[in-house]
């Protein structure tokens, strides 16, 4: 299990030092912001600054605001695909190993026809993207999905694609109406990456581990059953990451 953190350029020396001390990967979080993507000067400046760190095998959080790769509106589908491709191109420039995207599954639509369409079209578009970017892994993350089934169906259809995997966001799963046992057991064959933070089981608060209601010992018991998984400590404050690293040390003894 390798741990990842979200670096901040304004205090990058601290993050580099922490990364070296604990052998941490980085997951870049600036590049899902439309205001960054549409500001060419800022975008290139950020890319250059991260390139100057001379890293590799990091991950990048891809676009997710209003993304709908399977929309019935062709223009929305085209813009969504354009944004997703931009994430993958940036990841290539940063020598990342993987990009994380959300399912963006519309949970309020309950019809079987929508479910079937979502699976069919999602499989098609991710196969296309995997062919376009053969040196990148693509991980699809549960957002506010009610249960793991749609993500499981998608992953099963793409199980022969060696560069496709599931990113299980434990905090998102924790506030769903489905027990974490079911999330882990259903998605276990496909999980390659995990997003981890704590919350009060009501809202996605991105707290340090141990500051919410999540059973951290149980979570790491489940994580330790997975093969070759990476884990992002998905909190923004440096102090919260340090707290979380100390919690992990205790539960991993």
Image (cartoon, rainbow, N blue to C red):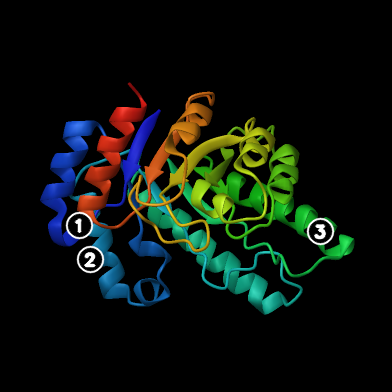
Residue 90: tell me if it is visible.
yes
Q: CA distance from mark 3 to mark 1?
A: 42 Å
x, y percentage for residue 171? 50, 51
Q: Residues within 10 Å of mark 3 (few under 14, many from 20)?
A: some
Q: Are marks 2 and 1 in contact (CB under 8 Å)?
A: yes
Classify mark 3: helix, strand or loop. Answer: helix
**For residue 231, which numbered disc appears in the image?**
none
Residue corresponding to mark 1: 49
x, y percentage for residue 190? 62, 34
Which residue is more in the foreground, 99 or 65? 65
Q: CA distance from mark 2 to mark 1?
A: 6 Å
x, y percentage for residue 54? 21, 43
Classify mark 1: helix, strand or loop. Answer: helix
Q: Residue at x 55, y 50 (%)?
A: 174
Classify mark 2: helix, strand or loop. Answer: helix
Instruction: Report the side of 10 relative to 88 (left or right).
Output: left
Q: Residue at x 37, y 51 (%)?
A: 234
Q: Residues within 10 Å of mark 2 (few under 14, many from 20)?
A: few
Instruction: Report the side of 158 relative to 142 (left or right).
Output: right
x, y percentage for residue 245? 27, 38
Instruction: Report the side of 61 relative to 190 (left or right).
Output: left
Residue corresponding to mark 2: 45
Along the polypeptide, which appears first: circle 2 or circle 3?
2
Q: Residue at x 28, y 66 (%)?
A: 44
Along the polypeptide, which appears first: circle 3 or circle 1?
1
Residue 136: tell me if it is visible.
no
Q: Quadrant of the C terminus?
A: top left
Q: Is residue 176 above or below residue 70?
A: above
Nearer mark to the viewer, of 3 and 1: 3
Nearer mark to the viewer, of 2 and 3: 3
Residue corresponding to mark 3: 115
Which residue is more in the foreground, 22 or 28? 22
């Amino acid at each position: 299990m390798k741990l990842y953190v979200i670096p901040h350029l304004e205090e990058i020396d601290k993050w580099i030092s922490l990364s070296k001390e604990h052998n941490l990967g980085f997951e870049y979080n600036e590049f899902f912001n439309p205001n960054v993507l549409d500001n060419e000067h800022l975008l290139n400046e950020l890319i250059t600054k991260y390139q100057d760190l001379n890293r590799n095998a990091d991950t990048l959080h891809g676009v997710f605001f209003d993304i709908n790769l399977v929309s019935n509106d062709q223009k929305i589908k085209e813009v969504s695909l354009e944004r997703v491709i931009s994430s993958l191109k940036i990841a290539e420039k940063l020598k990342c190993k993987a990009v994380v995207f959300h399912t963006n599954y519309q949970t309020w639509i309950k019809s079987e026809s929508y479910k079937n369409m979502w699976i069919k079209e999602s499989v098609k578009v991710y196969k296309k993207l995997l062919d376009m970017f053969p040196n990148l892994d693509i991980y699809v993350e549960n957002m506010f999905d009610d249960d793991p089934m749609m993500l499981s169906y998608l992953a099963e259809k793409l199980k022969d694609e060696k560069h496709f995997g599931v990113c299980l966001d434990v905090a998102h799963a924790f506030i769903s109406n489905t027990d974490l046992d079911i999330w882990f057991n259903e998605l276990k064959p496909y999980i390659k990456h995990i997003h981890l933070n704590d919350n009060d089981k009501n809202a996605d608060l991105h707290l340090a581990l141990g500051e919410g209601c999540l059973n951290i010992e149980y979570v790491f018991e489940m994580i330790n059953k997975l093969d070759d998984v990476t884990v992002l400590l998905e909190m923004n404050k440096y102090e919260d990451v340090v707290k979380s690293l100390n919690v992990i040390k205790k539960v991993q003894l």
